[in-house]
Amino acid sequence: MSLQNLQPCTAILWLTEPQSPDEKPRPLLRSWLTDTDLLTSRMRRLCADKFRLQVLEDDATQTSDTLRRVMLCCGDLPCIYAETFLPAKTRAAHPWLRELGSESLGEALQSRSDVSRGSFEYALLGPAQLPVNAKVSDESALWARRSVFTVRHEPLTVTEIFLPGLIECENRHARIGN
């Protein structure tokens, strides 16, 4: 399964730049979308001791293709929903992927020398295209990005959806900092 397969009725148009014919992300959101550093690290800096990685789904016992779903939160405020598509072959070749638990996948990948990351693709997802865990109450469209990591020739795909809580958290931080 992948994010696209979860929503078969509504095709997702992935773009090479974070802009659609209808909308461009605001500069602050664009900086998050295009950031090539770890989002987890940036969230930790933003939220300090309030940062929380919540594992929503991670069936480490599966031998088939699986999805690992997590939410990056600032306190109780959900900021980024992330979904990793792990092919069975990748999980078999890298058993450590089954042992992540509450550890950040990005931080685990960063510590390895045999990892490369492909370029980002971006999409503006309408309410019908969002996974249940990423839906927000106001039914607005949300920006997402995805990229393929290769771990010693085995792929995994990470999709991240940027929730309204992220901008709210940034705005709170800016008010406190001033």
Image (spheres, rainbow, N blue to C red):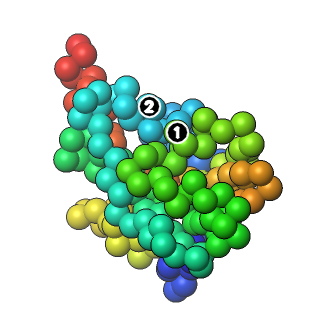
Question: Callout 2: few (<14), some (14-19), or many (20+) C-alpha neighbours within 10 Å?
Answer: few
- Which of the two discs, 2 and 1, sits closer to the camera? 1
Residue visible at 57% across and 54% down in the picture: 96
The 10 Å Cα crowd at callout 1, few under 14, some 14 to 19, many 20 or more, is few
Amino acid at the residue labelled 2: Arg
Which of the labelled discs sits on residue 42, or is there none? 2
- Tag 1 secondary structure: helix
Which residue is found at the position 71% from the left and 44% from the top?
115
Residue 125, given in percent of the width and then of the height, sits at 48, 64
Q: Where residue 60 appears, x then y in whole percent?
A: 47, 67
Question: Where does residue 37 sit, x and y in percent of width and height?
Answer: 57, 33
Residue where numbered disc 1 is placed: 107
Q: Is residue 172 left or right of residue 103?
A: left
Spatial distance from mark 2 to mark 1, Cα to Cα?
A: 12 Å
114 sits left or right of 161 in the view = right
- The image quadrant that residue 108 belongs to is top right
